[in-house]
């Protein structure tokens, strides 16, 4: 499993196919067709949210998957695979990689990342885990805890990184230069030119692109914002 995921995704594009309940494309069927479109376009892998979506998408495409479950808990800002319950559910789908929030934010039940992840790592020693990080320090700590992959997914989305220009190329370069583990760039990659720049960084493993490909309402908003104001 490990060898296959890394071999199949090396140097390529992983497309994030997600739609939350509040979004117009929310549907496991629609996400499965989005995954097919991504594969037809040349994607090396898929990142997906929820057991329902992942199950349908894995019927439709044979690409490697990074799976997550986004779930809000009232006592924590962490929502990407926050607890053992979400991990247990994702394991049943057979996804090659499970991604989790690996920031320093407190998890549900007042637990730290260490308290949450150590039992998970012990329970699933052969499962690949990706650390969704916001800072360099997050990534270093994730490696120490036993994560297999680090990503820049949450840079710009935590209180300490809010407002950071994305993609954070400096962070990506530093991770690639100093961490002896696969680095996946994610966040703020809105053009093929930016993707080319990211994947040209020495040591980068792969990159995830989501909104720029699979969220048409966000894409439309960017185009509408570019419409010149008309003089009255």
Image (cartoon, rainbow, N blue to C red):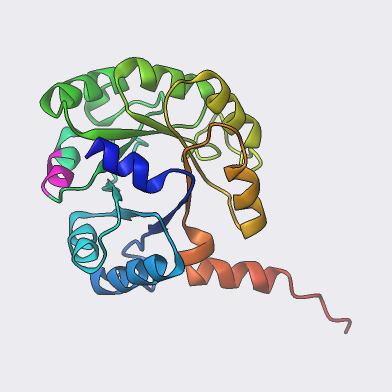
Q: Is 191 on the left or on the right of 122, as rendered? A: right
Q: Residue at x 25, y 60 (%)?
A: 62
Residue 79 visible within the image: no
**Extreme right residue here?**
231
Q: Quadrant of the N terminus?
A: top left
72 on left or right of 133: left
Q: Is residue 133 left or right of residue 61?
A: right
Q: Position of residue 59 (x, y in %)?
A: 18, 66
Residue 107 figure quarter: top left
Picture quadrant of residue 102: top left
Residue at the image position 69 percent from the left and 69 percent from the top: 225
In the image, what residue occupies the spot 73% across and 70% down? 226
Residue range in magenta is: 88-92
Give the x, y percent position of residue 29.
25, 73
Magenta stretch: residue 201 in it?
no
Q: Is residue 214 visible?
A: yes
Residue at (45, 24) in percent of width and height: 139
């Amino acid at each position: 499993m490990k060898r296959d995921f890394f071999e199949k995704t090396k140097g390529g594009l992983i497309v994030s196919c997600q739609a939350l309940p509040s979004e117009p494309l929310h549907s496991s069927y629609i996400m499965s067709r989005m995954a097919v479109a991504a594969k037809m376009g040349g994607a090396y892998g898929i990142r997906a949210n929820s057991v329902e979506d992942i199950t349908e998408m894995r019927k439709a495409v044979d690409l490697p998957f990074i799976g997550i479950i986004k779930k809000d808990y009232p006592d924590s800002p962490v929502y990407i695979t926050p607890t053992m319950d979400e991990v247990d559910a994702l394991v049943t789908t057979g996804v090659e990689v499970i991604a989790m929030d690996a920031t320093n934010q407190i998890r549900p039940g007042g637990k730290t990342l260490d308290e949450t992840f150590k039992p998970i790592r012990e329970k699933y020693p052969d499962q690949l885990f990706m650390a969704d990080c916001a800072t360099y320090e997050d990534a270093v700590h994730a490696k120490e805890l036993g994560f297999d992959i680090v990503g820049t997914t949450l840079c710009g989305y935590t209180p300490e990184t809010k407002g950071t220009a994305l993609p954070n190329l400096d962070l990506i370069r530093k991770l690639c230069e100093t961490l002896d583990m696969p680095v996946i760039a994610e966040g703020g990659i809105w053009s093929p030119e930016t993707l080319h720049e990211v994947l040209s960084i020495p040591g980068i493993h792969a990159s995830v692109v989501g909104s720029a490909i699979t969220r048409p309402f966000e894409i439309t908003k960017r185009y509408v914002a570019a419409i010149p104001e008309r003089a009255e």
